[in-house]
Amino acid sequence: GAKFRYNREDHFYGVEAKELKGAFMLLDEASVTGTANIVMASVLAKGVTTIYNAACEPYLQQLCKMLNRMGAKISGIGSNMLIIEGVDQLGGTEHTMLPDMIEIGSWIGLAAMTTSELTIKKVSWDDLGQIPNVFAKLGITIERDGDDIHIPAHTEGYEIQSYIDGSIMTISDAPWPGFTPDLLSICLVVATQARGSVLIHQKMFESRLFFVDKLIDMGAKIILCDPHRATIIGHDFKSSLKATTMTSPDIRAGVSLLIAALSAKGTSIIHNIEQIDRGYERIDERLRAIGARIERIDP
């Protein structure tokens, strides 16, 4: 029931409606932001809205559960089909946000690469999906303590698993409940010091593996097979990465390069850290709190 307008000169679009009405929607892709926007619009629309091929990440689930506590009528939470019966109004509620699973995975990778013992508190373990399993495939020991994760110091290194037929392990991304693409770059950098080899396959997005040239400059053994696949041959900590000066291309690659720098021999400089700041609040302060030697240099 909405009207869409687009201003080509200003690259601005608007969507307006006097009243929204329910409809059936089959999404081209399971977009988290797209599903969330449709859900929020549908709860106060007239009639029933069905979203098929809906995203079902924990963040989307918590939004739906919060809206239900506010008076919405949403069913199918956690599946790829959401049915929303419109209501006249919503009320207030209290809500506790889920922890950032990408940050949790980044801390796991950091602990392994720096052979450090680390405890990550209040991780909402049941909402982590494949994350603990994938890091375990890389040989990282992850211990559950209630709702906390404990990573022991990997002083003897860690060994990448192989398939039952002995072929090389492949780690790839997929829409939830598959492994999140935002942690593939972390897995890639962690593998550079593992015992064994792994194929990282970035299926969902373009141009996310081009940061590997910076890791190669640091001494990592990586073969970029094509824009979506990279083979990593681990050093098994027998050879340290070397410090360098680099530029952060995006959030996920940026924090991967930061982890590499923290494990490297010497002093590294990372430019364009605004990219890292977008996804990791006060990252330098929090790293210093656990013993990292890191400084933010003002331009």
Image (cartoon, rainbow, N blue to C red):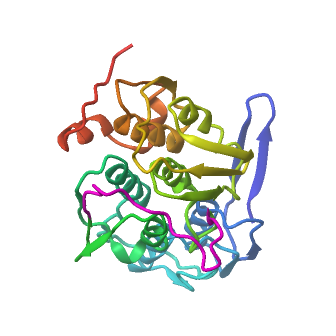
108 falls in the magenta region: no
Picture layout, residue 246 above or below residue 148:
above
Q: Quadrant of residue 56?
A: bottom right
Provide residue 105's location: percent of width, then percent of height. 41, 58
- Image coordinates of residue 135 in percent, x first then y, are 45, 64
Which is nearer the eye, 95 or 140? Answer: 140
Dominant secondary structure of the magenta stretch?
loop
Residue 136: quadrant of the picture = bottom left
Nearest to the observer: residue 158 or residue 293: 158
Q: Residue furthest right?
A: 8
Position above or below: 188 against 128: above
Q: Residue furthest bottom?
A: 75
- For the image, the number of numbered tags is 0
Please report the residue visible at 47 percent of the width from the left and 57 percent of the height from the top.
195
**Residue at (37%, 58%) from the top-left corner?**
104
Rendered-image quadrant of the N terminus: bottom right
Tell me, yes or no, whether the highlighted magenta stretch contains residue 164: yes
Q: Residue at x 46, y 67 (%)?
A: 131
Residue placed most toward the observer, 49 or 65:
65
Residue 283: % across, % down: 32, 39
Write down the region rendered in magenta.
151-171
Placement of the C terminus among the 4 image quadrants? top left
Q: Residue 294, relative to residue 208: is it above or below?
A: above
Q: Is residue 229 left or right of residue 32?
A: right
User: At x 36% / y 39%, what residue is drawn?
Assistant: 263
- Indicate the quadrant where residue 38 lies: bottom right
In the rendered image, residue 138, in percent from the top left (x then y), is placed at: 47, 63
User: In this orientation, does residue 66 appear?
Assistant: no
